[in-house]
Image (cartoon, rainbow, N blue to C red):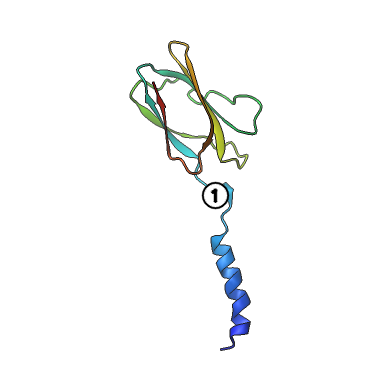
Amino acid sequence: MNFQIWAPALAVAVFAVSTVDVSAFDRRVIVVNNTSTAIQEFYASNTGANDWQEDILGESTLPAGNEMTVNVDDGSGYCKYDFRAVFEDSTEATKAGVNVCEVGRFSFEE
């Protein structure tokens, strides 16, 4: 077997295996409400957006002490998102730059 013939093919195979397309990442996150107040609204906007996207909860709420899985994939290919929660008592909490391609769980704490 001639090594010179196989070396370029091997290099291509190694490169193909080690390359990851960011669009393949899972953008589902378990959002945990570790506060004593229900979350009425939850927003997740990619860091390139100029405003908050739609309220992911819609008519639902995320009660205190509960969690839910949300898919924040907006088709943009972004991994970093800004999160915003609006609680029943009208207080708000935000967290910028959450990498949803790496984080599977995110908690709002008091």
Q: Is residue 32 above or below residue 22?
A: above
Of all residues shown, which one is farthest toward the left? 65
Residue ID at (53%, 23%): 55
**Which one is nearer the viewer's eye here, 58 or 30?**
30
Q: Split into 4 quadrants, where in the image is the C terminus? A: top left
Whole-percent x and y of residue 42?
49, 24
Left or right: where 17 falls relative to 104: right
Dot 1 falls on a residue whose secondary structure is: helix
**Residue at the spot x=63%, y=39% of the render?**
76
Q: How many marks?
A: 1
Q: Which residue is mark 1?
A: 24
Q: Position of residue 7 (x, y in %)?
A: 60, 78
Instruction: Classify mark 1: residues with Cα within 10 Å, few (<14), some (14-19) or many (20+).
Output: few
Location of residue 8 (image quadrant): bottom right
> Residue 106: where, in percent of width, then height?
43, 33
Q: Which quadrant does the N terminus fall into?
A: bottom right
In the figure, is residue 28 to the left or right of 1?
A: left
Q: Residue at x 60, y 24 (%)?
A: 52
Three-letter residue code for mark 1: Ala
